[in-house]
Structures are given as C-alpha cells and as structure tokens.
Amino acid sequence: MLIRPDWIHFTDREKVNIHYVWDDTRGPKVFVCDAAPVLRAAMQMSLRARLVLCMGLYEWTVWRFEGLDTRPEPLQIADAGWCAVADPRYLKFYELTRTEWLGPIEGPLWCAAMWLQPAMSRGYAFPKDLYDAISFLTRLAIHVLPRRDGFEAWLDVILKRLVQVFPEAPEEPFRDVFDRHVGRRLGPYIGRNVLNPAGTFDPEESVRFLAQTLRQASVAGNPFLSSPADLKDVGFRGVPYVLEP
C-alpha cells in the first residue's frame, strides 16, 4: 500500500478545517478555478506522462483527507491506478455507490475516484476522458485543499518536468492494432518518483517502483485490479503483473 509522499503535507489542524462549500448534488459546479494552463501543458507531454499527472493530482485529494476517513478504497484505487500507469488494462472497471459517499469528505473522495477510473483505464484510446479527468482533479484539489500554495508550486515544477523530459510523441498508426501490448505504446516508463519536486528523475527508480507496485498490488488481492482472466479476455499478452521490458 502506498504511503503519503513528502511533497504532500498538511497539519492535523489544517486538515480538520473544512473551509470550502460542498454540495453533493452540484459537484464541480461549485469550483471556481481554471485548469486551462494544466491542460495546455498536458497536451505537450507523452501519454504515460498524462497518466502519471492524473495519479499525482488524485493523490493530492486522497492525502488531504488522511486521518479524516478510514475507508480503504481511495488508497486501493491509488495502488491500482499506479498499476494502470504500466498498462491501463490493469485497472478494473468499478463503480462506487454514490449514496454511500456523501458529505464534504467522502463526497470529494467519491468524485476523485470516479473521474480517475475512465481516465486511467481507457484514456489511451479516448483522450477526452483523460483530459477531462486532469481538468477535474486539478480543480477538485484546489477546491478542497486547506491551502493551495504548496499544490500550485508543486504543479508548476511537475508540469515543466513532464513536458521537458517526456514530450508528446505521435503514435505509429498501425502499431499494435489489436491492443495486445498497450503498455508498450505509452512511452518510457515513469514512476511516482517523477512527482517529487525536490528530486531529479531516475528512470531506473521508476522501473523499480512500477515493478514493485504491480507485484505487491497483485499479491494483496486489490479489488480494483483486473484478474488474469479479465486480462486474457481483453487480449493481454505476457505475464500479468510483471513489468514488460
């Protein structure tokens, strides 16, 4: 299971301060910030970098509520989402019952999880799902965070890094037309370490992180992961939950 990264930190006093307006019936209609600059940057980076950005944004909302909610699902989804960075088919289709996730804490967690699912599982084939999630998760984080200065500083560094190190590259139109090796088409492997604004990107560390995450999530029986049978049904080739070279 993931642990909170060093770049996301709020005091207990800050976390219990629910300063924002939340209406379960209106959702993003109460957001006031603009995610257009984030989307412009996302369009200039590789597909896998967009998936990593999505995961980074999701984690800001999840860890904002650390200690305020005891449900296991948000972190289980985070684990499965990082597996989907390696291959989107690892993330199973899921739905969380809306009426069981209400209020200013569980409501945002539900929204984050439900916007993340289509982005990570099918964003490689339907780019709009991925861009919509990046926009939503950016605005959601800014809306619910106790303070936004740390998030905005982090986002500025990470967007520049992802664009510079992992620029967009056009996909070959006839490569893997039957979706046998989706993970190979997303660009170089990128791990969670790229999201550390105080560090430098180490490709080998990224590979180790993804390989370990796949192994641990599978062994733990994460309910948000596709089973080997599910993967076979969608044409997956290779050994499930082993990082392809």
Image (cartoon, grey):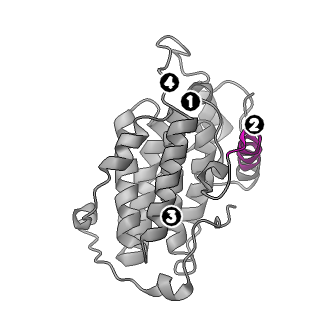
Task: Give the label on residue 28, or none.
Answer: none
The numbered mark, 2 or 3, whose residue comes first in the sequence reads 3
Asked whether the residues under the numbered discs 2 and 4 touch, taking CB atoms below 8 Å apart as contact, a structural biologist would say no
- 1 or 4: mark nearer the eye: 4
The numbered mark, 3 or 1, whose residue comes first in the sequence reads 3
Residue at the extreme top: 174
- 2 or 3: mark nearer the eye: 3
Asked whether the residues under the numbered discs 1 and 4 touch, taking CB atoms below 8 Å apart as contact, a structural biologist would say no
The numbered mark, 1 or 4, whose residue comes first in the sequence reads 4
Task: Give the label on residue 186, or none.
Answer: 1
Task: Give the label on residue 242, or none.
Answer: 2
Q: Nearer the viewer, residue 183 or 45?
A: 45
Is 28 on the left-hand or right-hand side of 186? Answer: left
Query: Could you tell me residue 171's position as x and y percent?
Result: 49, 19
Q: How many residues crowd mark 3 within 10 Å: few (<14), some (14–19), many (20+)? A: many
Query: Could you tell me residue 130's position as x and y percent?
Result: 41, 41
